[in-house]
């Protein structure tokens, strides 16, 4: 599963079929709370060309780890994926930190994330409310 915002290109063999599908999770309370209603799934042998702010990192999900939702780019389907509240609430109210983090766990799965998440929002900017609104709408559609 992959977030389309980090995808630059695909490389696949012409003789091997590649299936791309989107999965909507409209019946999940978890999906509505995080506004992650759609995921894009790639099936088959493919190389994804991705980009990230200051690079991307691929890690095994073995011991479990939580990272910022804005940094998450993708993960394999055998990863145990969940969402948890960040440690403190006050930085969220001040606009310094996100309220929720993604948690990855499991044996053989891997996840991919940006080394430095793109926050983009700067408190006090006139257009920051509009940027936040458009980010939320795009996130709902998995873009």
Image (cartoon, helix red, strand yellow):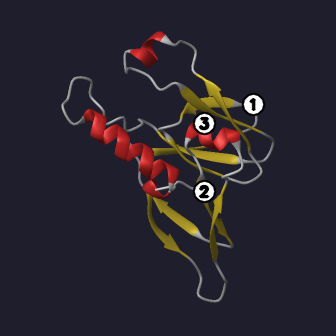
State if disc 1 and disc 2 touch (CB < 8 Å): no
Q: Position of residue 5 (x, y in %)?
A: 43, 55
Q: Residue at x 41, y 35 (%)?
A: 116
Task: Work out whether mark 2 precedes mark 1 in sequence or the reverse, and give the earlier one.
Answer: 2
Q: Is residue 38 above or below residue 22?
A: above
Q: Quadrant of residue 59?
A: top right
Q: Which mark is residue 63?
A: 1
Task: Work out whether mark 1 precedes mark 3 in sequence or the reverse, and give the earlier one.
Answer: 3
Give the label, 1 or 3, closer to the camera. 3
Q: Quadrant of residue 131?
A: top left
Q: Which mark is residue 39?
A: 2
From the viewer's side, name the closer residue of 118 and 126.
Answer: 126
Q: Residue at x 42, y 36 (%)?
A: 117
Label 3 belongs to which residue?
33
Q: Residue at x 46, y 10 (%)?
A: 90
Circle 3 crowding by C-alpha within 10 Å: few under 14, some 14–19, many from 20: few
Q: Give how far apart the Cα atoms at labels 2 and 1 are.
A: 24 Å
Give the label, 2 or 1, closer to the camera. 2
State if disc 3 and disc 1 touch (CB < 8 Å): no
Q: Residue at x 46, y 56 (%)?
A: 143
Is residue 86 left or right of 81 when viewed as pictured?
A: left
Q: Quadrant of residue 60?
A: top right
- Element carrying mark 1: loop
Q: Position of residue 30 (x, y in %)?
A: 67, 39
From the viewer's side, name the closer residue of 48 and 91.
Answer: 91
Q: Is residue 79 above or below residue 83?
A: below
Q: Position of residue 134 (x, y in %)?
A: 35, 46
């Amino acid at each position: 599963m992959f977030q389309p915002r980090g995808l630059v290109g695909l490389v696949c063999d012409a003789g091997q079929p590649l299936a791309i599908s989107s999965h909507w999770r409209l019946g999940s309370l978890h999906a509505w709370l995080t506004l992650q209603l759609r995921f894009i799934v790639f099936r088959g042998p493919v190389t994804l060309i991705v980009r990230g702010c200051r690079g991307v990192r691929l890690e095994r999900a073995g011991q479990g780890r939580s990272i910022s939702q804005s940094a998450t780019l993708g993960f394999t389907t055998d990863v145990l994926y969940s969402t948890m509240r960040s440690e403190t609430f006050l930085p969220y109210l001040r606009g310094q930190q996100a309220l929720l983090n993604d948690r990855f766990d499991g044996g053989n799965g891997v996840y991919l994330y940006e080394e430095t998440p793109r926050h983009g929002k700067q408190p006090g900017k006139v257009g920051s409310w509009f940027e936040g609104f458009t980010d939320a709408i795009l996130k709902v559609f998995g873009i």
